[in-house]
Image (cartoon, rainbow, N blue to C red):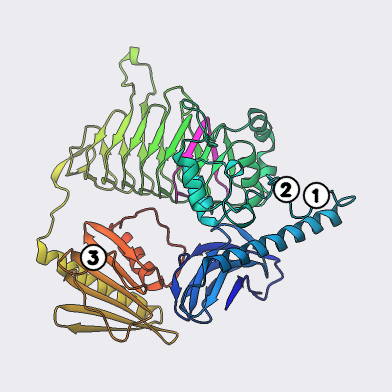
Amino acid sequence: MLRPLKTPYLGTAEKEVRVLSWECAEGERVPKGRVLCRIETLKASFDLEAEEEGVLCRILEDEGARVPVGAALAIWSSGLEAPPAAEVEALCAELRGRRAAREEDETGRSGSGKAAGPASGAPGPRSPALGAAASPAARRLAREHGVDLAVVPGGGPGGLVRVEDVRAWIAKGAPSSSPPEGEEGGRLDPLFVETLKNEAEAFGRLSSKLRIDLLRRLGAEIGTDCHLAPGAELLVSRLVLGDGVRIEEGVRIEAESFLAGAGTWIGRGCRFRCRRIELGENAFFAPEAEIGGGGAMDPEALCRIGSHGFVGERTHLNPCRPLLVGDEVVISREAVLMTHSFGQSALAGYPQRFAGLEIAARSQIGIGCVLFPGVKVGEGAVLLSNSSLVTDLPPGRLFGGVPAVDLKAAAHPPDRNGKIEILRAWIRAFGEGLRLRGFDCAEEETAGEFRLVVQQEGRIHLLRFRETAGFEETEPMPAEEVRVSLEAGEGKDPEDLPPEVCAILLEPPEIRGARGPLRDAFREFLRKRGVRLHPRTWSYRGGWL
């Protein structure tokens, strides 16, 4: 039976919910009890589970969309046989027609009268306010390639724009919504920027959705599922935010140009002031971190933070000259990074310097450290807490002291057996952490395999560890299975996995397959131990941990 999957009533007074994430893909055969998507109200988030076996035929609402209670989220088919595509398209067209009629009726009731529309059966022009009629997958592809859906001819029922329509439009080199070559995208309307300087506090009191909608209309480039908390002030001339960027309460950002990659998190009370600020994917700023200081708006001022890094509480970054930080760098709390130092006159013999500062990938700056202008930190190097760095720190070395001096190698990689022991210890620690949170969690040892069995609400979640990939199928199949191995082997290709299974490989670090609560919790556990799995743009939004 083909039917719309509707937004449930969640016992609140709210008239709409937000789609946080889809946990199943279009066309996927879904067992009873599997989480289809996660939705949230203003007060809580909820998992929408499959009430029966079936097929998720079509997703109708994107992640980040706000959907009225009772409206269709997707099209569902009972049983594990996919229905004919024509039937799915017909139901899509019917649902779109109902929605358009309802919105037209509401517009007529709210205005002075009902505006005349196109003749019956004739397709009217697409409304810019409502957006082009397009499948969620087509909208995602269009965003990735900067394509304006309003100009793409739709080949589906009722003019629906499908993925294949967007691909055809891209292939023929048709014009997109991207800025011309040589021009910067995301530049805000200058008049709005000037107005915002005087009304920043009032603008910060508006809802996140309203602010984001206004910023987009005025030129900003903002991805899906972004959030601007109350009191967040963005006084910028250029604004580009990737998907899932979160800017928390009391943040204030002043810049001529501000870019934040997907998954970036800027914590409560952060203060950023710099001519150019560029943040990579999954950059994390703890509360009250600061970018700024003297010379922060100089023409040479630049703060560039790489992907998947961490900047701790009350850290001060001074970028009056270029301050360049590579990928996966940890800058611990209360560290101070300076690109200028002066006090008394150099003519009287006092030291004075203006120079950029560079920190290479996968290095670590300890708590309370001070880095002086012009120093360079090499890849994989470590600076011990409360140290002062006045000379370059070579790659892979550990420095410490005031001033910091070379002490030893920063890392001492274990052999293969040592790595296996570390992994087994981590899995035991993960299981103990779940038990302390009230989970029924047991360890099992079999030939060549170490297991963690978690029972939650009558369902079995299984974590299996083998030194080398190549797992036999389990019978009966648990609700969720996570297969962890140090290295690839002669077993099945990780892409060829049952729908309930996720595979995690540590060398090289990658993750594939189904998403579930055990998988998300263990991935977050690994991230907190420095293991960042590919694809890396991923944020933990709560769960077992």
Can you identify the residue that label 3 sits on?
A: 493
Residue at 57% x, 43% y is: 152
CB contact under 8 Å: marks 2 and 1: yes
Q: CA distance from mark 3 to mark 2?
A: 49 Å
Q: Residue 408 at x, y = what percent?
A: 12, 46
What is the span of residues highlighted in magenta in the rendered image? 249-265
In the rendered structure, the answer to whether residue 523 lies left or right of residue 215 reads left
In the rendered structure, does residue 363 fall within the stretch colored magenta?
no
Instruction: Tell me: residue 439, above or below residue 262.
Output: below
Residue at horizontal 15%, vertical 66%?
Answer: 489
Give the labeled residue for mark 2: 124
Q: CB of mark 3 within 8 Å of CB of mark 2?
A: no
Q: Position of residue 27 (x, y in %)?
A: 46, 67
Element assignment for label 3: loop
Which badge, 3 or 2, is on the more N-terminal residue? 2
Residue bearing the label numbered 1: 117
Q: Residues within 10 Å of mark 3 (few under 14, many from 20)?
A: few
Residue 225 position (above or below residue 430) = above
Kindly tell me whether residue 247 is visible in this rendering.
no
Q: Amino acid at mark 2?
A: Gly
**Residue drawn at x 55%, y 72% as measured from the top left:** 76
Q: Is 58 placed left or right of 117 in the picture? A: left
Mark 2 lies on a secondary structure that is loop
